[in-house]
Amino acid sequence: MRVLLVEDNDVNRQVAQLVLANYGVVVDAASNGSAALRLFEEQRYDLILMDIQMPGMSGLEVTAQIRRHTNVTRARTPIIALTANAFHEANEKYLAAGMDDCLTKPFEEAELLGKMSALRLASKQATRPLFDLSELYQMAHGQTNFVRSILDSFLDNTPEVVTQLTAASDASDWAQVGTLIHKIKPSLKLLHAHELLTPIRTLETPDLQPEESAMATKQLIQLLPQLLRALEKCRQTLA
């Protein structure tokens, strides 16, 4: 397990590192928000321990930037808030800001390890994200306008494809279904929409039985609106 520890207090940071190291946890430590974001870009982490009160960027600000990461999977990295504030209202604020749990300092070793284990298990069991824009951003060389234009095109054109897919499925017109999935497949591959590519691969299977075609098409019709809603939220962050 690899953890990013973000803590500006030297003593607290060293104590947390020692505790985690005793349990075989690999720890990368940052003393401020900017250093934490640099480490986060360089390395994938299973979990982040985030101090709230830090000079410069606060833990809430760092969390907000992580949650906006273009790689959806990495943006969902579990984050535990480390805070000296024991009030329930403060914890609710941290959770609303995108953190997954809170730990009051000074914390008990067992409580820290228990929360880490629970979040790691929940993260492993989480549903695979519907899309991943990392490849698109690489193609765009970081140009947000290009990424937005691709999303605009997909969001503008795909609702009509959903309508046509529904009509073709209702009519058992599997040839038309094949034409439509051929139309949207390149975009889904670019968006790394793996969950939607699964029924498409099924529909591309030779000599598919009508009931199998109907089931795969129904799955695709159900997933496409979910993808559109998720991408629309992403597009709003690029405005």
Image: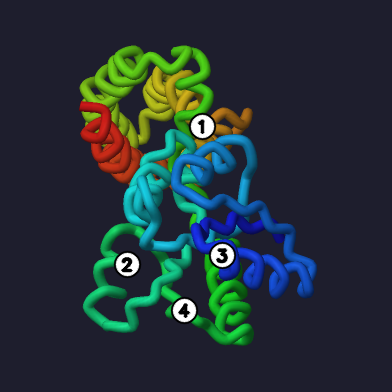
Mark with earlier residue (3, 4): 4
Mark with earlier residue (3, 1): 3
Callout in the foreground (3, 2): 2
In the rendering, at what x and y percent does residue 195 appear? Answer: 50, 43
Residue 107 versus residue 75: which sits nearer the camera? 107
**Residue at x 31%, y 74% (from the top left corner):** 91
Secondary element type, mark 4: loop
**Residue at x 22%, y 78% (from the top left corner):** 89
Q: How far separated are the C-alphas under marks 3 and 2?
A: 20 Å
**Residue at x 61%, y 74% (from the top left corner):** 117
Identity, as a three-letter code, of the amino acid under mark 4: Lys
Q: Can residue 167 be seen in this view?
A: no
Q: Name the residue under label 3.
A: 125
Instruction: Give the quarter of the figure containing the C terminus.
Output: top left
The answer to whether 207 is drawn above or below residue 51 in the figure is above
Q: How far separated are the C-alphas under marks 3 and 4?
A: 28 Å
Identify the mark at residue 105; answer none if there is no mark.
4
Identity, as a three-letter code, of the amino acid under mark 2: Leu
